[in-house]
Image: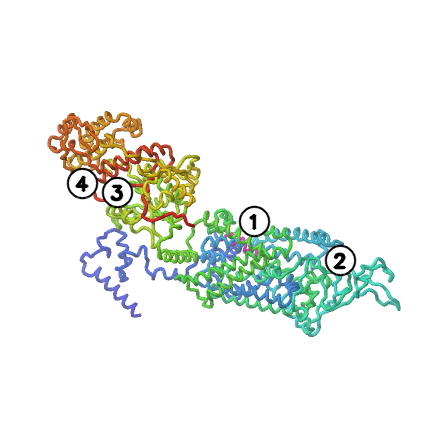
């Protein structure tokens, strides 16, 4: 009330303020705003005391305006009720207003508990439970039931935690797993759960057909089994199952296609059948304590006889004061007379009749306590009765005895029984129809599992206490007149169980055919598996028509198998895998402690989930190890398919969380120290530049990166944007997207990084310094050679390049500089032959050895052979050097040809002097002459023309070869890369004073030789005439080249000459990169030396080591 009064007073004050004095007021609360939209905003927020936040209202609305929609949040796709309503409205008039969809109204009992009861109690309880107790014994069967029920209970606890951690839309288990473990696990487990549900439908149909053909209407069999025995009878039975199973499947699929409303209307009827059948069994157990039902079993010796074909369980009977043979006598003897020849076993053993249902107070429990496993074809024998038989006698009349139809063992019983405890997801699958899913799912599911577990465990004990062992082991009731064994125990009649179980199995089959297509439709609509998208479509009302067709086709596979005992372990695998991942999801979320993990259900623990997951995995291999492997292979294939081809989804899943935790742990481990030499590999920082349109100028750098890395290790592709972060953030994001797209095109697995800096130099330095995270940092920098470094506009670029060289050296990082990167192969090219030549001049830690090895792992370079050249000086033993190098490579396990190149001392040629002189003169001219760009080009052109004329006269042959390689036809003057129209302006260098004596002809005295200089007076006059004010220009032509530069130029020329001779045709040349000058003077000279060193080579990779060993001979 107080708050309401305050708001009223505030509103009144504002009204008086706006309309009180008539003076013009500020029309909008937004500063300097006069637009109509701002006026609307001022009216909208006026009086709400929210002026401080008004500029954010468009993106961040007020809580009061959205609180209602948050509380009524709904993200529920159409459930079965919506489908039903849509069908009912198909025939309605178009003008009729469509009624609003009703809110979910199902509670815990009708929405979760009873559906779970109906799905858990199924065909196995009625058809195989008694047989399992007879084969496995009460003790063994109790262990199986307890183990399976414990697994489902632990899974239900985990599922309850997940289901109460937020709103669970319709989709149930698939939704929970996919949103908890990610699209890969969710898709894989969703498909497994779908296959399990589909095969469950096949199992229920086969159970219904077995009830029909064996217990209800045996004469309906198409393939007659009378008179057949052994394999023939089994084949006839399976064929009958296939024919009738296909018919029933087609009928059920048609019912589901016509409308799910019919299935929903019959659900309560089917549920009533299940409950009445179970109650009839308990009533029969109670009745056996007072009046056991009469179901005699005829025993010959200790073998159980099939009850059909005789009426009296005796060999002879007394009639009219005489002994008369019975029908049983005629079965085993060749005539009805007492002196007939009979079967040896029949003749040697007596016939006895025992009570099949002795009752709960008979003490038969002690006899049924332990297991009685049989091989296929074994006789069902009564314990405690001795029989006379010859072990070597030929068995005859075997079709008159009850025989074991399959070989039984403990793990088989687990696989057959486990489907009877599935169905615990029925409640979560209906989450869209529940009034309060977070409350109903845990209570209803756990209560249903508790109820069914009590029923199953008590049934094991009661069956063992009431029914004779040979009857329990009689799977099809052949010894009790063909009755269903559990039906013999029921009250008031066996038909209660037979009819009830038949309808319940039919209902369960319909439920499976209804739920499985919708599960597949949910997976398809999530678009996590591209090829399943077609199954997301259906009828106008949303019915999954295509998914139903696929479900029926897969279900037909189970029908063709035709054996209930063979189909049950298959669906056990898929359900167990689904339950395993539900437990894994809960355990992961609990251990990771993600902030969003806040389930309302508090009775869970990661240890319980882990125990449930372990039980599921153990049961998978206990049931059938080969089925388990097949199921896991299917799930793995689906997982990998989604990972590589599926749509990327971000659902905040636990796998992403565990990836972050694992990454943090790994990064912390990397911080402990640098990697061992054996684990060293180039972790590359690729420095690329972009043009004005944000296109990468050197895309082949990423191709080379991919060929070096092959997806291993760390790759960072970085670039720099000039500007400020606030003004250029959008530009940086655009550049990042371009880098990511190019990395995807070139198949480079790594990270992109864009920094914004006031200049490119600082941006590149920042990338080198801060790239990577913790111990996962780059140790190698890959940068392209600045091919236009001689042009005046690229003066800054080559200086940045030299700074990169200096910074990587200071940071002890390796440096890779590919020259002529445009000529490098793309990832799609293949070299069928050729060489990768390594010129090992100085030891750099082994980088030159490691890089060719890594390149040859890629398909582009795989067929290239490796050659290693090293240089021997005058006083070196080249023969011994070659032997040592071969031994070293052998220990390194590297295959390569070895050659030692001898470089003898030679005189420095005039060409070397003049090339050095031209280099220094260019530098000095640019320092002394302050000309415009065009003037500098004309000036330097005249000087270089004169220089070339002198060089041509001194070294005509060398110059011709140089010109042929440097100046291809059609290249303009502006494009020539050498001493043509190129300038370098070094403001930091200081001119060298020309103090050397110059002869009138230009000759210069040098140590050891006399070199004639050929600068002409014409050249000097041209320079002076062009700029008479530059009085010092003439001194440039009188300068003497620096001796250190002369030696470096001599080395570059000699090495280039040797490399061209040996490696001119090599596919790639790797070469040690000399270090940059220590001072800032002569940076142009350093670039010139590298140009001369690599001149004429097509592909060169300059390599500079990081100062540590990167390759070792040890294992």
Marks 4 and 1 close (CB-CB < 8 Å): no
Q: Position of residue 177 (x, y in %)?
A: 47, 57
Disc on the earlier residue, 1 or 2: 2
Percent of width and height locating residue 861: 41, 39
Label 2 near label 3: C-beta < 8 Å?
Answer: no
- How far separated are the C-alphas under marks 3 and 2? 98 Å
Q: Which mark is residue 1076?
A: 3
- Asked if one can make out residue 540 in the rendered structure from this viewpoint, the answer is no
Residue that mark 4 sits on: 989
Q: Are marks 1 and 3 in contact (CB under 8 Å)?
A: no
- Total count of labels: 4
Nearest the eye: 765 or 469: 765
Residue highlighted by disc 2: 398
Report x, y in % for residue 223.
71, 51
Q: Is residue 743 above or below residue 923?
A: below
Q: Is residue 385 magenta?
A: no
| Predominant SS of the magenta segment | helix
Q: CA distance from mark 4 to mark 2?
A: 112 Å
Task: Give whichever of discs 3 and 4 has the lower sequence position.
Answer: 4
The Cα atoms of the two marked residues, 3 and 4, are separated by 15 Å
Residue 642 in view in this figure: yes
């Amino acid at each position: 009330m107080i708050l309401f009064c305050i708001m009223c007073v505030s509103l009144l004050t504002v009204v008086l303020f706006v309309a009180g004095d008539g003076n013009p007021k500020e029309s909008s609360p937004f500063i300097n705003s006069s637009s109509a939209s701002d006026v609307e905003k001022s009216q909208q927020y006026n009086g709400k005391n929210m002026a401080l936040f008004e500029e954010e209202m468009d993106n961040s609305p007020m809580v009061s305006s959205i609180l209602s929609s948050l509380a009524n949040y709904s993200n529920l796709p159409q459930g079965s009720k919506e489908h039903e309503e849509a069908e009912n409205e198909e025939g309605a008039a178009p003008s009729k207003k469509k009624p609003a969809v009703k809110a979910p109204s199902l509670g815990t009992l009708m929405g979760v508990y009873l559906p779970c009861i109906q799905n858990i109690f199924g065909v196995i309880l009625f058809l195989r439970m008694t047989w399992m107790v007879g084969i496995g014994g009460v003790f063994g069967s109790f262990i199986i039931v307890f183990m399976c029920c414990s697994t489902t209970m632990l899974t239900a606890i985990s599922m309850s935690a997940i289901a109460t951690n937020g709103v669970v839309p319709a989709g149930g288990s698939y939704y929970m797993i996919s949103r908890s473990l990610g699209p890969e696990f969710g898709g894989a487990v969703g498909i497994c759960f779908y296959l399990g549900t589909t095969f469950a439908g096949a199992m229920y149909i086969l159970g219904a057909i077995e009830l029909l053909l064996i217990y209800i209407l045996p004469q309906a069999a198409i393939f007659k089994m009378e008179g057949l025995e052994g394999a023939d009878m089994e084949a006839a039975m399976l064929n009958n199952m296939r024919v009738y199973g296909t018919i029933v499947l087609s009928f059920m699929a048609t019912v589901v296609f016509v409308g799910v409303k019919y299935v929903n209307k019959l659900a309560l009827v089917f549920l009533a059948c299940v409950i009445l059948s179970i109650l009839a069994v308990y009533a029969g157990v109670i009745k056996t304590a007072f009046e056991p039902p009469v179901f005699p079993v005829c025993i010959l010796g200790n073998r159980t006889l099939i009850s059909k074909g005789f009426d009296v369980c005796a060999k002879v009977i007394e009639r009219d004061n005489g002994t008369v043979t019975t029908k049983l006598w005629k079965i085993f003897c060749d005539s009805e007379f007492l002196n007939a020849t009979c079967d040896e076993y029949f003749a040697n053993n007596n016939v006895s009749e025992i009570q099949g249902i002795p009752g709960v107070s008979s003490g038969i429990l002690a006899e049924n306590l332990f297991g009685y496993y049989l091989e296929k074809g074994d006789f069902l024998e009564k314990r405690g009765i001795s029989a006379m038989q010859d072990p070597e006698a030929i068995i005859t009349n075997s079709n008159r005895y009850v025989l074991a139809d399959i070989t039984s063992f403990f793990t088989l019983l687990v696989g057959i029984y486990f489907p009877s405890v599935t169905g615990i997801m029925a409640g979560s699958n209906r989450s869209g129809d529940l009034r309060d899913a977070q409350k109903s799912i845990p209570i209803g599911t756990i209560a249903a599992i508790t109820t069914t577990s009590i029923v199953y465990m008590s049934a094991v004990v009661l069956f063992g206490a009431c029914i004779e062992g040979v009857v329990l082991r009689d799977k099809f009731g052949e010894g009790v007149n063909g009755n269903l064994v559990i039906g013999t125990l029921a009250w008031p009649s066996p038909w209660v169980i037979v009819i009830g179980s038949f309808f319940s199995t039919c209902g369960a089959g319909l439920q499976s055919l209804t739920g499985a297509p919708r599960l597949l439709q949910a997976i398809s609509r999530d678009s996590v598996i591209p090829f399943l998208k077609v199954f997301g479509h259906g009828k106008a009302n949303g019915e999954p028509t295509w998914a139903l067709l696929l479900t029926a086709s897969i279900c037909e596979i189970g029908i063709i198998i035709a054996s209930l005992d063979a189909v049950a372990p298959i669906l056990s695998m898929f359900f167990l895998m689904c339950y395993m991942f539900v437990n894994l999801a809960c355990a992961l979320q609990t251990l990771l402690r993600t902030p969003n993990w806040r389930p309302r259900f508090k009775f869970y623990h990661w240890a319980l989930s882990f125990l449930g997951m372990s039980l599921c995995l153990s049961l998978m291999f206990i049931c059938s190890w080969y089925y388990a492997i097949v199921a896991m292979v299917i799930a793995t294939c689906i997982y990998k398919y989604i990972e590589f081809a599926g749509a990327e989804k971000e659902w905040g899943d636990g796998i992403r969380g565990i990836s972050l935790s694992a990454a943090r742990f790994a990064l912390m481990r990397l911080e402990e120290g640098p990697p061992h030499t054996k684990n060293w590999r180039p972790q590359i920082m690729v420095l690329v530049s972009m043009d004005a349109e944000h296109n990468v100028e050197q895309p082949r750098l990423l191709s080379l990166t991919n060929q070096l890395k092959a997806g291993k290790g760390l790759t960072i592709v970085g670039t720099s944007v000039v500007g400020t972060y606030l003004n250029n953030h959008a530009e940086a994001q655009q550049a990042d997207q371009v880098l990511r797209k190019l990395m995807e095109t070139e198949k480079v697995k790594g990270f992109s990084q864009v920094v914004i800096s006031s200049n490119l130099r600082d941006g590149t330095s920042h990338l080198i310094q801060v790239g990577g995270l913790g111990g996962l940092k780059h140790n190698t920098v890959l940068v392209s050679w600045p091919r236009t470094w001689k042009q005046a506009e690229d003066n800054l670029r080559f200086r940045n390049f030299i700074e990169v060289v200096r910074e990587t050296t200071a940071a002890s990082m390796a440096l890779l500089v590919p020259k002529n990167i445009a000529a490098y192969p793309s990832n799609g090219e293949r070299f069928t032959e050729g060489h990768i030549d390594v010129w090992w001049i100085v030891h750099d830690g082994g980088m030159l050895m490691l890089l060719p090895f890594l390149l040859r792992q890629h398909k582009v370079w795989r067929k290239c052979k490796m050659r290693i050249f090293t240089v021997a000086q005058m006083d070196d033993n080249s023969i011994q050097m070659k032997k040592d190098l071969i031994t070293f490579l052998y220990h390194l396990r590297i295959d390569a040809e070895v050659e030692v190149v001898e470089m003898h001392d030679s005189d420095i040629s005039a060409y070397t002097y003049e090339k050095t002189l031209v280099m220094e003169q260019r530098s000095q001219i640019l320092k002394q002459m302050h000309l415009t760009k065009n003037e500098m080009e004309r000036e330097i052109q005249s000087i270089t023309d004169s220089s070339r004329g002198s060089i041509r006269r001194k070294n005509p042959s060398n110059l011709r070869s140089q010109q042929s390689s440097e100046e291809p036809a059609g290249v303009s003057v502006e494009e020539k890369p050498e001493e043509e129209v190129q300038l370098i302006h070094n403001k930091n260098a200081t001119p060298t004073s020309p103090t050397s004596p110059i002869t009138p002809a230009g000759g210069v005295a040098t140590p050891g030789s006399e070199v004639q200089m050929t600068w002409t007076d014409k050249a000097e006059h041209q320079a002076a005439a062009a700029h008479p004010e530059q009085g010092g220009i003439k001194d440039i032509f009188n300068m003497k080249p620096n001796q250190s530069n002369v030696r470096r130029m001599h080395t570059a020329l000699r090495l280039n000459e040797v490399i061209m001779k040996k490696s001119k045709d090599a596919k790639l040349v790797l070469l040690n990169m000399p270090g940059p000058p220590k001072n800032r003077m002569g940076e142009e000279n350093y670039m010139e030396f590298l140009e001369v060193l690599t001149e004429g080579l097509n592909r060169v990779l300059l390599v500079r080591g990081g100062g540590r060993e990167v390759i070792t001979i040890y294992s």
